[in-house]
Amino acid sequence: MSVTTFAAAGATGRLGRHVVEVLAERGHRVVPMSRATGVDVVTGRGLAEALDGAEVVIDVASWHASDQGAATEFFRTSAGNLQEAGRRAGVARIVMACIIGVDKATVGFLVAKKVHEECLLSGPVPVRLLRAAQFHEFVGQLLDWRQGDVAYVPALPSQLVACRAVAEELVDLAIAAHSPGTPVPEIAGPRREILAEAARLLGARRGVRVDGSAMPDAELAADGAFLPGPHAKLAGPAFQEWLNAQL
């Protein structure tokens, strides 16, 4: 197997740490990019140095909150910086993790991620996309964002998926000989679940009460807009099995 040099944007994040782990396990050289490693994809600090010699960029950097305006600005700026620095460094391609349903969303964080896709795709470096369902790990973050004793979690129909499974699929996509083209590849968990119900399972263990709240694009969600399509790869474990394995 030939060794490829990867640069991973968002390397210390929820998904990024799994991407770095999978790449290292497969014998590739990885340059982790995050503020913690001295690389800022928004200001551009350290970006040129990190991409020097990199052949492929995996972009899993994310914004830390759900505000659409701030998230949109983050993704627009980071995409432009990665494309320009990638072009100068001679990067062969950028592989990006996105979210199932961004092409249908009309409001909120998913719209910001759609802008992320569009900005990356408009640049000179070829881009490969992978859209994933909501992560198992995201459920705990929603509980952490609570105000007071109650966590308000949207009753979103999804097929929750483990970050590790998404990381493996991203790496497979990154090293594949050819781009998958259309439709955009998707990865999701093995069965349909409700995000608020998954949060209640975890909340019961943490002593946190969960309120299954309304969500943006509720009608679209009810119609399955954020569920995987028939071409999606389904990867276990389901949320309950994943949660049990965390103990």
Image (cartoon, helix red, strand yellow):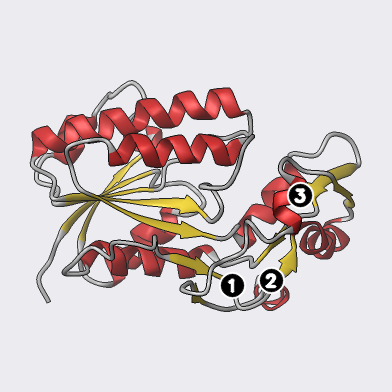
**Of marks 3 and 1, which one's residue comes earlier in the chain?**
1
Q: Residue at x 31, y 39 (%)?
A: 120
Say few, some or many: other residues with alpha carbon within 10 Å of mark 3 (under 14 / 14 to 19 / 20 or more). few
Query: Can you tell which mark lies on residue 239?
Result: 2
Earlier-in-chain disc, 2 versus 3: 3
Rounded to the nearest whole Å, what is the CA distance between mark 2 and mark 3? 24 Å
Give the residue number, with chain letter if any, for mark 1: 189
Residue at numbered disc 3: 219
Q: Residue visible at 60% across and 43% down? A: 105
Camera sees residue 38: no
Tag 2, which secondary structure?
helix
Q: Nearer the viewer, mark 2 or mark 3?
A: 3
Return the residue nearer the eye: 200 or 157: 157
Give amino acid for label 3.
Answer: Glu
| SS assignment at label 1 | loop
Contact between marks 1 and 2 (CB within 8 A): the answer is yes
For the residues marked 1 and 2, what is the alpha-carbon distance in whole angstroms?
Answer: 8 Å
Of badges 3 and 1, the one in the foreground is 3
Residue 114, horizontal then vertical, whole percent:
47, 40
